[in-house]
């Protein structure tokens, strides 16, 4: 692993802490009394925790030259990631149904929410696929894996802004997007300062992949054609 990223484990641990704090008031605080939650919520939590653990463990194994174990866990991710993607989509389905049935969110606003999977599920999936495609190109591989972590932390950051700072959903959503963009920009600057950007532009590509759907979020969900399309999905 590149010397500049020898402490990347600390980055992943920080992300894990943010996710934990973000979901603390809405999930973890109820432990062990989880009566209000469905089995799916626990499954979703477990598999997302597993992914964060994978991100933490993998660089440790590389630093300790445990390449066999690193590859073994990498192969496990071939199964874990598809389950994560499906779980994320189901989570959005629950959020959509809950927003209508329990929170009284306007139907048009609920239709707008159906665009949200394109802002995180799509980038997450794309980054993982790029990481696997570049698994023999170590520099690109671990940069795209870092990018998956940046996407995952957005969910925790969103809830942290809402539950700890009292921000409304849309304000927290846009703030978390800006923070994620700044994280990618910081990683690009970090690569530039360490003389890596000329040889590897993975973070630039990641920023582009992440930014496009999140920029489209500003106006596409409010168009008539999107709402017609979203209505068709519901039906």
Image (spheres, rainbow, N blue to C red):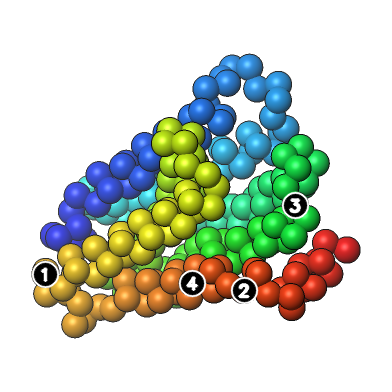
Callout 1 touching callout 4 (CB < 8 Å):
no
Q: Residue furthest right?
A: 235
Disc 2 element: helix
Which residue bears the numbered disc 4? 215
* Foreground disc of the pair 1, 2: 2
Callout 3 touching callout 2 (CB < 8 Å):
no
Which of 109/87 is in front?
109
Distance between the alpha carbons at the discs numbered 3 and 4 = 23 Å
Counting from the top left corner in percent of width and height, residue 60 is at 27, 47
* Foreground disc of the pair 3, 4: 3
Q: Residue at x 32, y 71 (%)?
A: 203
Which label sits on residue 193? 1
Q: Which corner quadrant of the image does residue 30 belong to?
A: top right
Distance between the alpha carbons at the discs numbered 1 and 2 = 36 Å
Disc 1 element: helix
Counting from the top left corner in percent of width and height, residue 1 is at 21, 61
Which label sits on residue 220? 2
Lower position in the chain sequence, tag 3 or tag 2 = 3
Q: For mark 1, does the 10 Å Cα neighbourhood hold few (<14), some (14 to 19), or many (20 or more) residues?
A: few
Distance between the alpha carbons at the discs numbered 3 and 1 = 48 Å
Q: Residue furthest top?
A: 33
Q: Residue at x 65, y 22 (%)?
A: 34
Distance between the alpha carbons at the discs numbered 3 and 2 = 17 Å
Lower position in the chain sequence, tag 2 or tag 4 = 4
Distance between the alpha carbons at the discs numbered 2 and 4 = 9 Å
Which label sits on residue 106? 3
Q: Residue at x 13, y 60 (%)?
A: 3
Q: Left of 233 or right of it: where is 117?
A: left
Image quadrant where one finds the C terminus: bottom right
């Amino acid at each position: 692993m590149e010397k500049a990223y020898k402490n990347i484990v600390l980055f992943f641990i920080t992300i894990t802490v943010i996710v934990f704090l973000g979901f603390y008031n809405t999930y973890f605080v109820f432990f062990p009394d989880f009566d209000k939650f469905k089995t799916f919520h626990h499954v979703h939590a477990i598999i997302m925790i597993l992914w964060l653990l994978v991100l933490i463990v993998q660089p440790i194994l590389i630093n300790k030259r445990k390449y066999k174990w690193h590859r073994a866990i990498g192969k496990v991710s071939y199964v874990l990631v598809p389950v994560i993607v499906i779980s994320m989509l189901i989570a959005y389905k629950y959020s959509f149904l809950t927003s209508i049935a329990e929170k009284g969110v306007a139907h048009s606003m609920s239709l707008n929410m159906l665009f949200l999977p394109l802002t995180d599920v799509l980038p997450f999936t794309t980054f993982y696929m790029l990481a696997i495609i570049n698994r023999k190109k170590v520099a690109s591989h671990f940069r795209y894996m870092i990018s998956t972590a940046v996407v995952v932390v957005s969910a925790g950051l969103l809830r942290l802004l809402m539950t700890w700072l009292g921000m409304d959903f849309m304000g927290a959503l846009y703030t978390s997007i800006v923070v994620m963009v700044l994280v990618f920009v910081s990683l690009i600057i970090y690569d530039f300062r360490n003389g890596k950007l000329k040889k590897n532009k993975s973070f630039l590509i990641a920023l582009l992949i992440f930014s496009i759907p999140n920029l489209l979020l500003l106006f596409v969900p409010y168009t008539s054609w999107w709402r017609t399309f979203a209505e068709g999905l519901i039906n």
